[in-house]
Amino acid sequence: MSRFPKILLFDIDATLLLTGGIGRISFQRIFKEKFGIDDAWTGLVPDGKTDPLIFDEIALRALGRPLSPDEYRRLCRAYSANFKRMIGSDAKFRLMPGVKILLQKLASMDNVILGLQTGNFEDIAWLKLERGQIRNHFEFGGFGSDHHDRARLIRAALERGFGRIKKSIPPRNIFIIGDSVQDVTSAKRLGLRSIAVTTGRASYAELQECGPDFLLKDLSNSHLFTKLILS
């Protein structure tokens, strides 16, 4: 491994995979069970948001108040249980184009370290990767359960990554890969490089406007991707 390896932190939803709406269904189900609220998800745009922020947004709109700490803990447990029951049987689950081949290629490179930066709670994140059979490529990450703010959870991921390799890495060697404007703006806040993909709801123009270092249609061109991170 070179003196300064590359750290790549991937978003999950709409970057690596799609669950087919399991998260939305689980959120709606637990708010129905706990508070009798129908269609709690209606009008919510989850792109780039952490799970704690989604809980807060739904509660403020549907209940007109924040959740109490006890309510939040109970909803988190119910959400995790619902998600775990549903993830194994959803026929709409799929990996995004080129993801499996790209991850296999990156994992074979001795100067590349793969991690996660996702708004998902940690247990939910690992369940998704296990369902997609790509869990083995990742050993650490930053999660919505670390912090509601995306830049803060990216810092948590980097602390774990630096701890694994016993050294810090220059910002130029750290890439944030994601499909949302928040992925790009969080990378900028931290002085990191970003690779945006148009596999989510954000359009090419919207992503281009926020100024990622690189902008790709998807992750299907593994040769181009590796060329970019090694440049």
Image: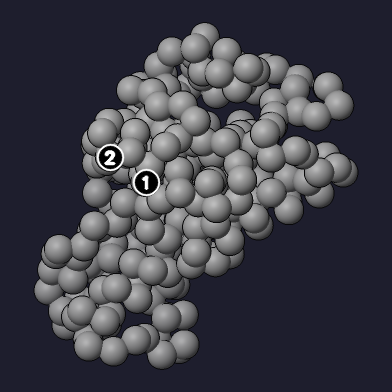
Residue beneath label 2, please? 206
**Up/down of 203 relative to 44, above or below:** above
Give the quarter of the image for residue 167: top right
Q: How many residues crowd around disc 2 within 10 Å: few (fewer than 14), some, or many (20 or more)?
A: few
Residue 153 image position (x, y, % from top left) = 57, 58
Q: Marks 1 and 2, how far apart in space?
A: 7 Å
Task: Give the structural element (helix, strand or loop) at label 1.
Answer: helix
Residue 12 image position (x, y, % from top left) = 44, 42
Quadrant where the N terminus sits is top right
In depth, the one of 225 and 71 nearer the eye is: 225
Residue 94 image position (x, y, % from top left) = 32, 32
Residue 111 showing in the rendered view: yes
| 192 left or right of 177 in image | right
Residue that protrudes farthest toward the top in the picture: 223
Which sits earlier in the primary sequence, circle 1 or circle 2?
1
The residue that appears at 80% across and 29% down in the rendered structure is 4
- The numbered disc on residue 181 is 1
Task: Give the structural element (helix, strand or loop) at label 2.
Answer: helix
The residue that appears at 31% across and 43% down in the rendered structure is 19
In depth, the one of 121 and 202 nearer the eye is: 202
In this picture the colour scheme is: one colour
Residue 220 image position (x, y, % from top left) = 40, 16
Residue 14 showing in the rendered view: no
Q: Quick check: marks 1 and 2 in contact, CB under 8 Å?
A: yes
**Up/down of 221 relative to 8, above or below:** above
| 37 left or right of 92 in image | left
> Could you tell me the amino acid type at mark 2?
Glu
